[in-house]
Amino acid sequence: MAVFVLVSGPFTGGWVWREVVTRLRETGAEAYGVTLSGMADGSEPPAVAAADVDLERHVEDVVGVIDGIGADEEVVLVGHDYGIHPVLGAADRRPERCARVVYLDAGMPGDGDTPLALVPDASVAERAGGAGGAVPAPSGGEWARWGSTAGLSAADLARLDRMAVPQPLRTLTQPLGLRGNPFDRPVTGVLCTANGSGIAMVEMLLASGPPEFRVLAGPRVGFFELETGHWPMLSAPGPLAEVLLRAAADEGRRLTVPDGPPSARTETFLLDVAERPRERRGTVDLHLPEAEGPWPAVLFVHGGPVSPDRRPTPRDSPTFLGYGAYLAGLGAVGATLDHRLYGLDAYPKAAEDVAAAVELVRADPRVDGERIALWFLSAGGLLAADWLAAPPPWLRCVALTYPLLAAPPDWRAVPERFRPVEAVGASSPPVVLTRAGLEHPVFQATVDAFLVAAGRAGAEVDLVDVPHAHHGFETSDHTDETRAAVARAARAVLARLRV
């Protein structure tokens, strides 16, 4: 039987695993719920000052547990939330002892990543400055900000309140140091569906997400789902113990990268677009009409996250080269940009880039600065929130194509400001929304919620449906239906610009 080493998320210690440990041991397996330095339960003061604890010390704690297990035992390391960071650090230092790593409702950190990037509110680092170098533990309803509390009873929440302790700040701000690849060993992902994670989300990332997610389709990677919130060791200890035993037995659903659309990208745009003059201004490209100006302008905003090393960059991809030239051919400046959406915590930086690009476009003497539209695609849709909530008078239209309009619950690093579902209102500019009929369920749910919110607020929405199209259809689904949808959306945007 495997030996399970269980490492919990922030503010908690080994006590949180008590019921899971009991169930695992009842099957004959051995299990240890680890209490990391400074994380003893709240019934007594911590033995170590928060200022003396960092991520490296927590890694050493887990290494110490591994070293105390018999050399012939098979060790399965389980990291929940923040706990995946010390787990990966320990697995990296004792690779010969680690038979498997289980990501329990956790992110995918790599070498150099800080846990702070995955917390729901990065400003906790600033607030912790006056709290003895520690982030105060949440209480009551605050727990929901750190993950879904679905499945937790009132007694469970009271237990969290009573036992939780402050999280040493340096455990969140110190970068994780890894020498090897975390996926060079068997890996299991356990996804808590009530927290927004699920196999459908992973399949979406494999189909159309950044290339780095392709490791999730590896032959030694398996997945399980639990229908509960972010603390399954409290809300579903029995099912969690069963899943951990199955993971140790190398069970779990294997995923593959889809062979067909939308991963089968082409190197051309879906429309046959004539080339137009293009000027590069830093991170912004201007695709220019041939007619006399001043012209209205449409700024296209790509999704992400994208790697800063991605080549070609979004504005040089077939999709944005195509959109820019197409709008120029229709008599408007088609502006494209590369913004800094390099991670889920980077939406504020990306928003700054979009605002700067808008000002650059409006300042061009060939552009009519009073006739501007913003066109957001995919997860770039979250960046539309500011413009929907407080539109300037010159913003005539917001276009959204297969957008994400509310952050999934497990995208906790996305600031609350970026929620178009909540931002849309009666004062929002007209919206042209292109909806893909074969959209990822996670994205589609946010589109449905947006349409409900817009209807209640009396916002103007021109809906362009593409029933047989996938997410990212411009370079995968070259059909009469998708070509007509792009043309219709463009006409709808231009109609608002010409009023």
Image: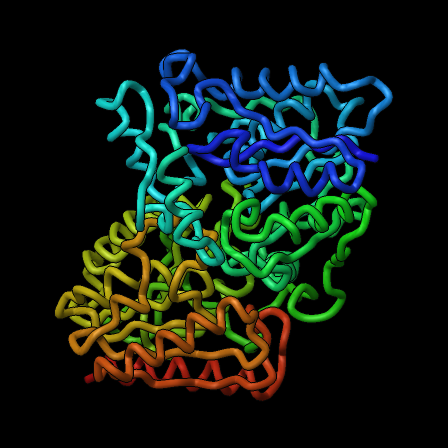
Q: Nearer the viewer, residue 173 or 84?
A: 84
Q: Tell me residue 32's x, y (percent).
A: 65, 28
Tell me where residue 137 sits by quadrant.
top left
Q: Nearer the viewer, residue 468 or 22?
A: 22
Q: Tell me residue 488's x, y (percent).
A: 42, 86
Q: Tell me residue 256's x, y (percent).
A: 75, 58
Q: Tell me residue 414's x, y (percent).
A: 38, 50
70 vs 443, left or right, is: right
Look at 64% across and 60% down and name the residue there. Answer: 199
Confirm whether residue 65 shows in the render: yes
Confirm whether residue 215 shows in the render: no
Q: How is the image coloured?
A: rainbow
- How many dots with numbers? 0
Look at 76% across and 53% down and name the residue there. Answer: 252
Please state, as top left, top right, bottom left or bottom right, where the N terminus lies in the image.
Answer: top right
Q: Is residue 167 above or below residue 192?
A: above
Residue at the extreme left of the image, as rendered: 393
Please state, as top left, top right, bottom left or bottom right, where the C terminus lies in the image.
Answer: bottom left
Look at 36% across and 60% down and name the residue there. Answer: 382
353 vs 472, left or right, is: left
Q: Is residue 477 above or below residue 106?
A: below
Residue at the extreme right of the image, as rendered: 72
212 vs 218, left or right, is: left
Look at 53% across and 24% down and name the residue there. Answer: 35
Q: Nearer the viewer, residue 421 or 312?
A: 421
